[in-house]
Amino acid sequence: MTETGPPGPPPAGTLDALAAGLLALRAWAGNPSYAELVRRIGRLRAGRGLPPGERSPGRVTVYDCFRPGRRRIDVELVVDIVRALTDDEQAAGRWRDACRDTLSPPPSTPGHARTGLPADPPAFTGRVADLDRVLAALADGHCLVAGMPGVGKSHLAVRAAHAVLRAAPDTRPLFVGLRGYDPEAPPAAPESVLAEVLLLLGAPADQVRRLTPEDRAALYQRLLADRETLLVLDDAAGTDQVRPLLPTGPGCRVLVTSRRHLADLDATHVPLDVFTAAEALDLLAGATGTDRLAAEPDAARRIAELCGHLPLDLAVTGADLARQAHWTLADHVIRIAALPRDEAVRPALAASYATLPDGQRELFRLLALHPGPDVTPDAAAALAGVDPDEGGALLRRLHAENLVQEGAPGRYRMHDLVRAHARRLAHVEEPHSRQHAAVTRLLDHLTHAAGTADALAFPQGRTPGTPALPGVTDQAGAVRWFTDERAVLVAAARHAAEHGWSDHACRLAAHLERHLEVSGHYPDAEVLHTAARRLGDPGQRIRAAVALGRTCELTGRYDEAIGHQTDALGMARAAGDRTQEAYAHGNLGNLSAQLGRFPAAIDHYERVLEVTRSTGDRITESRVSGNLANVYSSVGRYREAVATLRHNLAEFASLGDQVSVGIWHFNLGMVLERLGHYDEALDHHTRGLELARENGYRRGEGGSTNCLGIVYASLGRTTLAVEHHLRALDIAREVGARDNECSAWTCLGFAYGLLGRHEEALESHRAALAIALDTGARRLEVVARNGLGEACHALGDEAGAVAEHRRVLAVDMGDPYEQARAHRGLGAALPGAEGAAHRERAREAYTRLGVPVPE
């Protein structure tokens, strides 16, 4: 090699640019042959416990990475090429970032999809004929409600949707806000909306992430074809945004709202005009009383005319009339007529703003700078730089003026048009320095509050900071706070990362790490940790790499996870960060166990224990010793596993970490079930499920539900077992936990077999095997193959049974229970002396392990 440094990666651009950069790097390194590169990469991967070879799991070769015109590339293979050429981990990290920046899809506004509907509007004026037309249209197919801003399209759509559900309660409701006219971002991209809806419909997060837009659309159509569905697409920008989201199934009806008349949309069009004069007066009367309008009918009609009969303006003006009841309606006519017509939301909003006291006007402007979907009194106080009591009072006064809306109690949001008006006022009336200071105060508040909640919800031996969460004093309260604030915190972290508050972005990502993992919001975690990995100081980047690797692990992307943890381990060692070094080793131990490399897992866990015993980190030491116990269980050392897990359960109970207590109940229950102690196992899994639900731990809820099904099957309550496995399958798909999904399929197949439903058992085990092979989880693969062999035997396919059980025995990963199970399966499938020999080996193995011998 030459003495000059290696050429760096190209800036994010095209795959051809990456290929050209790799060719330049290879030339710098002396142009080693591709065969030599393959050998070097094989040595590198063997050193990390990965299988050698030139091909990545996506079948991309070393040669492919250097060839222009490629349409696919494997990030980790490119990183290993750079390692092999430069022996420089920092260079490898820069190339990984360049590859990811190139492959990242363009940003798009999320569509805010959800199951269920917004609340039925309690005060709904007029629109009787319009409502009837919408319901008639939906009876035949799709419906478009179109009209000007503020005309009440969304209110009418929600009212109609609730009427449909009352008439047909089995209909599945889906609501998607398309944000067609968001002033800060483009409309929600159809592919992003498809991804959100697929997740709501139970598609695994990791699968959705890998699908092309065409494949997302195909899966979307399949999942919507199974039952009656009402899909509300609110605030569409145009036909191109809506058309990919239209289901083709006969049981699906779609209700679209848009400011535009989408003439080429295949739907019944219901144009929505402003209120009639009578409807406008009815709305004003509801706000201020019929007697007052009756006393000044001409002035009342004039107010309605000045508001253009627009429902939004009428609602805000009605609040003015009610607040200033000592004014005559004639006085209000003069006031409204004297004000210029506001270009965004008509005169009523401008009139309301003009009458606000200074403090309310300032908060109104600053609320538009809040990046999240809603705001609490404490956050409003931070924006305005006032104490929480005053912030809450100001917010409640704005609510009384109909300038903000209250959704959940204590949470307020602005209508899109009102927010746009407030943002314009903020830019006109607030200097940039004050805007920046307000957002900084908000981010300071959210970061401190999130840190306090993190220490309460997931103690890990930490003491919460200065109280920043009024009314939240315990773990359960902090978990609820995180659940309520998640969307705001994630939006704030993303805003901070994109607009120059890097430290806030990194600290928010760190404080949200455990909550996002526990609650199963893995896509949010990946976005935040990726940003922190790029923006943080050295310590923050190490922690982000560990967290990003953990997220990849939980979504079944084991090769990526190993890459992140290996990077983190190298950085932590270089920085002398023993804590993150221990975390990286622990996560590498988890990955090794999943991949069936139990000796490597034990080595990683023992390295963690060396660190924690020197640093006094009891939490990590106890957690990792528990993981070590799980490996003991996998290799048949059940008594050691039980003793360690019982000790850890008591340890975590004393430390107050209820999430971890639930995990160890779950782990202990699994070993006790294996040993045949079914009643005790049932108690532990029941308690584990209770704690998972209390703390919002969705992954743990799914795991405990699945294990309860295993115990019920062992106790002969097989129908109940099937119900639990199906529920566990739903949860695993919902959060994108592919290992849990694989386990649920396997256990469901076993339960179906006990019920004699052997065809369903066969399909369940095939589904499990597909996931295990896709993720590379050898531990799960052998379990799935044994189940598949047993199902083949039950269906009379002895050749298939023998093939699967022999494949299990060919995998030398040190799991004696699954090997005994394979011998048992061969004993049932093979005739004569050969079968008898396998049956005897199985019996001896079960006896040696001290577990019940299956009948």
Image (spheres, rainbow, N blue to C red):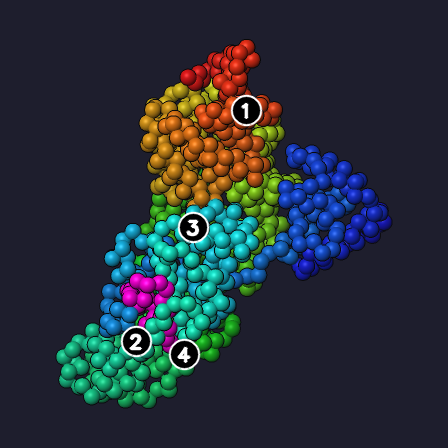
How far, Cα to Cα, is label 4 from label 3? 40 Å
Who comes first in sequence, dot 3 or dot 1? Answer: 3
Tell me which amino acid carries mark 3. Answer: Leu
Q: Residue 798: horizontal and vertical position, in percent? A: 51, 23
Crowd class of label 4 (few under 14; some 14 to 19; many from 20; radius 10 Å): some
Who comes first in sequence, dot 3 or dot 2? Answer: 3
| Disc 3 target residue | 223
Q: Which residues are magenta?
A: 134-160
Q: Nearer the viewer, mark 2 or mark 1?
A: 1
Tell me which amino acid carries mark 1. Answer: Ala
Secondary structure beneath label 2: helix
- Compared with 702, 791 (above or below) is above
- Compared with 689, 543 (above or below) is below
Q: Residue visible at 52% across and 47% down?
A: 207
Residue 485 located within the stretch drawn in magenta: no
| Disc 4 target residue | 344
Residue 137 falls in image quadrant: bottom left
How far, Cα to Cα, is label 4 from label 2? 14 Å
Q: Nearer the viewer, mark 4 or mark 2?
A: 2
Q: Residue visible at 16% across and 80% down?
A: 292
How far, Cα to Cα, is label 3 from label 1? 35 Å
